[in-house]
Image (tube, rainbow, N blue to C red):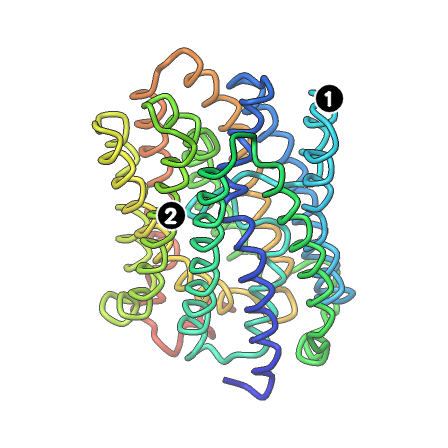
Amino acid sequence: MSDYSRDIYILGAVRTLRSFSFGYVAFLLPLYLKYVGFSYEMIGLYTLIATLSSAVLTLASGWLGDLYSRRKALAIMSLLPAGTYAIVLSTRSYAALMASAAFGLTMSPIGGGSGGGPVAPLQTAMVASRVGPEARTRVYSYLMMAAIASALAGSAFSGAIMRASGGYYLELFAVALLITVATSALVLLVSEEPDRAHRPTSAVPRRSAKNIGKVSLAGLFGSLGLGMVMSLLPVYFRELGASDFQVSLIYDASYAAAAAGALIAPLAEKAMGPVRSILVLRGLGSLLLAAIPFSRPLALAGAIYAIRTGLYQAALPIRQNVSMELYEPSERSRGLSITGVFRRLPYGAAAAAGSVLFQVGAFVAVFSAAAGISVLDPVLYYAFFSYFDRGGKAFKARAEE
């Protein structure tokens, strides 16, 4: 690790704290919207608005980070979910709740595919500025494991509140609001210097443009498929007879599986090669979606969801490291923000389309379509970048040609 290891710990703390609240908000928000009277279509529309807003914010975060300050941009973007929580805590107005989607909280759980919000491009690039390529997959894996452990703790915490409370858990949104404000302040302790060393000379990321386009195309299909089902899965589990507490247990299991996936990521990368491991892990994680509507009882459906989450997430640290070598250091935030937009926009559109199929009970059709479309992401990624596995240390020079 570099001399900036203190920054890595701070960034890890920020991500870990945020993950505590996101560990339950991902499933609690759609359940809450359903509770106050939103239909499937309205929840799908909410997800569409949130992902459109998140796309705009993600694009802004990349440009602000590269051209102005990654630290200050991260502090601003970290604070945005507080707007959603404040509205949820203050009103049940349909119009106000729908407007809260403008803050970009996409209800995407671990393994959702919408790209991690506008903070993700900044965090990933800031870690890359402080850690060499030979250690990045391992560091990304450690950060991911800490975040998942925190998400699991948050989900368990929410489960305890659910069991003790007969209401609809507004206190959980209050906790999320406090955490959001605290993490935004914590970001300001990170140093600026490593990112200043890579200030761009052009507003447009030119040298990385080709690779950005390829990653964006692959990611588009992944989020188009996953968007059809992920935001509505909590409500689907309710349709199978799950209580809110049982839904939280399913998400606990998925977080635990994702933590196991983070552990195996460096091993998979070493055994299969980075890009081939992405193909295998994300391919299996996508295809397993097709089995969910055929799975009874509820425990089996929950187990399949957890396993596919673990497989899908195992590829994330590997993919982050590959992306950092695909993009010029001065263009990393913008490259990640552009590819993030190509994940968020189809995710939101697919959520709106998928909600119609959910409303009419076409569960086999929507899960099968989600699996078939999302698997194109790792397939295309392998087609574009399989030379990384063959090129080894020569990869970066070849990628920049």
Where residue 22 appears, as percent x and y from the top left, is 54, 48
> Which image quarter: residue 145?
bottom left
Chain-order first, disc 1 or disc 2: 1
Residue at x 56% of width, y 82% of height: 5
Q: Which mark is residue 4?
A: none
Decide if residue 194 is on the left or right side of residue 352: right
Residue at x 36% of width, y 62% of height: 262
Name the front one of labels 1 and 2: 2
Report the Cα–Cα distance between label 1 and label 2.
Answer: 32 Å
Where residue 285 appears, as percent x and y from the top left, is 30, 45
> Which image quarter: residue 119?
bottom right
Residue wearing tag 2: 252
Residue wearing tag 1: 95
| Foreground residue among 257 and 319 | 257
Residue at x 36% of width, y 36% of height: 246
Compared with residue 86, is residue 190 higher up or lower down, i.e. above or below? below
Q: Secondary structure at mark 2?
A: helix
Where residue 38 appears, as percent x and y from the top left, is 58, 19
Classify 10 Å Cα crowding around label 2: few (below 14), some (14-19), many (20 and above).
many
